[in-house]
């Protein structure tokens, strides 16, 4: 029989077969990375609260995403930035004559706030590229992670959009509408990052437990009431409504303050009327607390585990935030308490998302 090349087996290849992207997925590592990013965002929100309460946000009048990474390195550069700041109404009407030392004090806080934002961008982008190169990203998750990066970049642009509103001739602070937009985007980013991490750590449950659907609806109601309370709190911060009506539970001796509907058209009272904005924030906070307590009581029927503990943690966080809000108001919003109040709002958001995630309905696949 004549020899034929086909009679011999092909030599084994010394090159390992290509691994399709995602076959070496490492969900736990991705989740830990995302939780770390969420923690950085949490600190960013707290730092933003301190920046707002100290009036530091307008001290840097340039948006330089790359060059602005470094602080001023010469006296001439310090003087240039100080001269820029002296052209805006905040300096002329509030800080006139406070000198280079006063300017540097507010500058460093705003610089730290912006630097932390850049740090978050690097802490997100570099591991993302590394995980992608190693094929460690679970299938189907890549587009979501890319969208989160884009949203983070948008948040930086929104931040400058907010700051620029404070340079107008008739303002000593930023627009409350832009402030609420910036704060809301921070909450949204934090929530999306945390939810994605939870999905990787805690896959969808196999089935429902008794009363789970009903309790989930109660948790979701408390969560969205908390979100509305945070939105209202953004307007409280934006128009500095917390520096008025510093008593509780009454406002100027009345349950509903006088002048609640003073502005025309009526919708402006929701965002620009100090009495109405603060009353709405109090009302929504009280409704949120009641809803959270109801969810916590209902959660007693759940088996001991993540979901029940998360609901109770949510109720505890909302209760702590409610008490802290009262103390902050009674002390006329000192920087320390105001910053803590804004930071704890993120804690409420985190606890609510954990409770919601722990009670979510089963589904076929995906985080």
Image (spheres, rainbow, N blue to C red):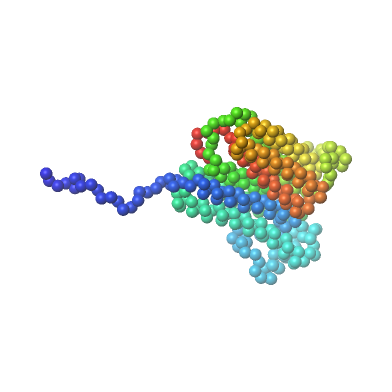
Query: Which residue is nearer to you in this view: 98 or 226?
Result: 226
Can residue 196 be seen at all in this image of the molecule? no
Q: Is residue 180 left or right of residue 258?
A: left
- Farthest residue in the left direction? 1
Question: Image quarter for residue 320?
Answer: top right
Q: Is residue 303 left or right of residue 281?
A: left
Residue shown at 35% from the left, 49% from the top: 17
Query: Which residue is nearer to you in this view: 17 or 29?
Result: 29
Residue shown at 64% from the left, 48% from the top: 186
Q: Position of residue 366 (x, y in %)?
A: 51, 38
Residue shown at 65% from the left, 50% from the top: 42
Question: Image quarter for residue 166?
Answer: bottom right
Residue shown at 79% from the left, 47% from the top: 327
Q: Position of residue 302 (x, y in %)?
A: 62, 33
Residue 305 against residue 67 in the figure, above or below? above
Q: Position of residue 46 (x, y in %)?
A: 69, 52
| Count of residue discs | 0
- Farthest residue in the front direction? 304
- Farthest residue in the right direction? 253
Residue 112 against residue 241 in the figure, above or below? below
Q: Is residue 363 left or right of residue 339?
A: left
Q: Position of residue 52 (x, y in %)?
A: 73, 53
Q: Quadrant of the N terminus?
A: top left
Residue 178 against residue 266 in the figure, above or below? below
Can residue 98 be seen at all in this image of the molecule? yes
């Amino acid at each position: 029989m004549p020899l034929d090349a086909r009679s011999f087996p092909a030599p084994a290849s010394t090159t390992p077969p290509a691994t399709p992207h995602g076959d070496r997925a490492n969900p736990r590592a991705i989740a830990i990375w995302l939780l770390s990013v969420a923690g950085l965002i949490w600190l960013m929100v707290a730092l933003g609260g301190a920046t707002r309460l100290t009036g530091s946000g307008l001290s840097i009048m340039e948006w330089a995403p790359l060059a602005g990474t470094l602080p001023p390195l010469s006296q001439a550069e310090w003087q240039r930035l100080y001269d820029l700041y002296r052209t805006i109404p905040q300096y002329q009407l509030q800080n006139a004559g406070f000198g280079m030392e006063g300017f540097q004090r507010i500058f460093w806080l705003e610089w730290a706030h912006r630097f932390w934002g850049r740090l978050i961008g690097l802490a997100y982008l570099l591991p993302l590229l590394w995980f992608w190169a190693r094929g460690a990203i679970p299938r189907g998750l890549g587009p979501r992670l890319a969208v989160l990066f884009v949203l983070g970049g948008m948040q930086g642009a929104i931040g400058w959009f907010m700051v620029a509103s404070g340079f107008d001739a008739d303002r000593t602070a930023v627009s409350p509408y832009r402030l609420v937009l910036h704060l809301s985007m921070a909450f949204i980013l934090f929530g999306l990052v945390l939810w994605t991490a939870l999905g990787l750590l805690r896959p969808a449950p196999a089935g429902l437990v008794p009363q789970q659907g009903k309790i989930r609806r109660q948790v979701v109601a408390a969560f969205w009431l908390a979100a509305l309370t945070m939105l209202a709190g953004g307007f409280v911060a934006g128009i500095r409504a917390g520096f008025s009506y510093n008593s509780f539970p009454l406002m100027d001796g009345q349950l509903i303050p006088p002048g609640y509907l003073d502005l025309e058209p009526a919708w402006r009272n929701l965002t620009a009327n100090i009495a109405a904005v603060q009353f709405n924030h109090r009302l929504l906070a009280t409704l949120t607390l009641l809803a959270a307590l109801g969810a916590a009581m209902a959660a007693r029927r759940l088996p001991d585990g993540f979901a029940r503990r998360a609901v109770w943690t949510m109720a505890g966080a909302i209760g702590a935030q409610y008490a802290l809000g009262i103390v902050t108001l009674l002390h006329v919003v000192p920087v320390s308490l105001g910053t803590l109040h804004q930071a704890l709002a993120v804690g409420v958001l985190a606890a609510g998302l954990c409770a919601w995630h722990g009670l979510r309905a089963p589904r076929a696949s995906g985080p």
